Image (spheres, rainbow, N blue to C red):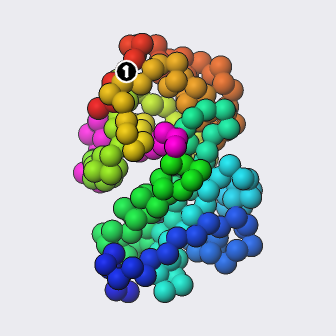
């Protein structure tokens, strides 16, 4: 399939029901793109897509779904979470990922909020460290920054142990520092609204324990 960002044939739309044919294509790309340790069940996704605070967005080219993003707009804070973003394996490296991100953050529901992004950490040696560094660089080029010193711990979404993760932050105009009180609310929203954990989970306290009052965004 020949796809170019120059031909303007990429289109973005919201999927809001599990019965939508594009939801099936979204699930297919989701399954092939994410390891089991980071995947939710199809049943869980079909419930999420109908929740108004979730944005399931698909990019299509000539009526074929080529990628998607899933954004959760938190109810209690000024942030949202980019839960997933993926491009079909046969059309990668054609600017579709950048298009998905750019169009997602332009959405009215997202534009005035901070966007949080969970990415695989590349801070330790591993066979796929190069891929992890590349993925993080992708988001950094789009303007995302990392919370300095935060050892982010993602709760499990399946029976598999989740990988080590880093937390990135995006907004059109990012401050140099972020208040720890605000960061705490973001983490609590992640744990409660995404993973069904408690807001007073001790893991959140452990993540914040050694951070300064106003951590840098680097």
- In the rendered image, is residue 47 in sight? yes
Q: Residues within 10 Å of mark 1 (few under 14, many from 20)?
A: some
Residue 136: in sight, yes or no?
no
Q: Position of residue 87 (x, y in %)?
A: 43, 67
Q: Is residue 102 above or below residue 218?
A: below
Residue at position x 44%, y 77% in the image: 10
Image quarter hosting the N terminus:
bottom left
Q: Nearer the viewer, residue 19 or 108?
A: 108
Identify whether 25 is placed above or below 206: below
Q: Is residue 105 left or right of residue 3?
A: right
User: Where is residue 104 drawn, in percent x and y?
Assistant: 49, 57
**The one of 216 and 193 positioned closer to us in this rendering:** 216
Magenta stretch bounds = 112-131
Q: Is 217 left or right of 23, judged from the image as shown?
A: left
Of residues 215 and 152, the one drawn nearer to the viewer in this rendering: 215
Q: Is residue 23 above or below residue 165?
A: below
In front of the other: 31 or 61 = 61
Question: Looking at the figure, which quarter contains the C terminus?
Answer: top left
Q: Which residue is mark 1?
A: 215
Picture residue at 52% right of the left edge, 24% below the top: 182
Q: Quadrant of residue 151?
A: top left
**Percent x, y for residue 77?**
61, 32
Residue lying at 55% horizontally and 29% vertically, measured from the top left:
187
Q: Residue at x 42, y 58 (%)?
A: 102
* Location of residue 50 by image quarter: bottom right
Residue 156 image offset from top left, x and y in percent: 58, 40
101 within the magenta span: no
Residue 13 found in image quarter: bottom right
Number of numbered labels in the structure image = 1
Assign a secondary structure to mark 1: loop
């Amino acid at each position: 399939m020949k796809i170019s960002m120059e031909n303007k044939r990429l289109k973005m739309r919201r999927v809001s029901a599990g019965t939508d044919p594009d939801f099936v294509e979204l699930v297919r790309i989701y399954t092939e793109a994410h390891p089991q340790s980071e995947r939710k069940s199809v049943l869980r996704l079909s419930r999420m897509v109908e929740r108004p605070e979730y944005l399931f967005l698909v990019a299509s080219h000539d009526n074929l779904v080529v990628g998607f993003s899933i954004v959760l707009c938190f109810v209690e804070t000024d942030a949202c979470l980019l839960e997933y973003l993926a491009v079909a394996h046969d059309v990668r490296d054609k600017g579709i990922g950048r298009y998905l991100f750019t169009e997602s953050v332009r959405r009215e529901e997202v534009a005035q909020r901070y966007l949080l992004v969970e990415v695989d950490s590349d801070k330790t040696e591993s066979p796929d460290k190069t891929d992890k560094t590349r993925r993080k660089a992708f988001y950094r080029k789009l303007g995302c920054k990392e919370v300095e010193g935060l050892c982010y711990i993602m709760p499990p979404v399946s029976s598999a142990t989740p990988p080590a993760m880093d937390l990135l932050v995006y907004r059109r105009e990012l401050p140099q520092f972020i208040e720890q009180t605000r960061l705490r609310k973001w983490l609590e929203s992640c744990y409660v609204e995404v993973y069904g954990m408690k807001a007073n989970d001790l893991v959140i306290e452990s993540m914040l324990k050694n951070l300064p009052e106003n951590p840098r965004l680097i």
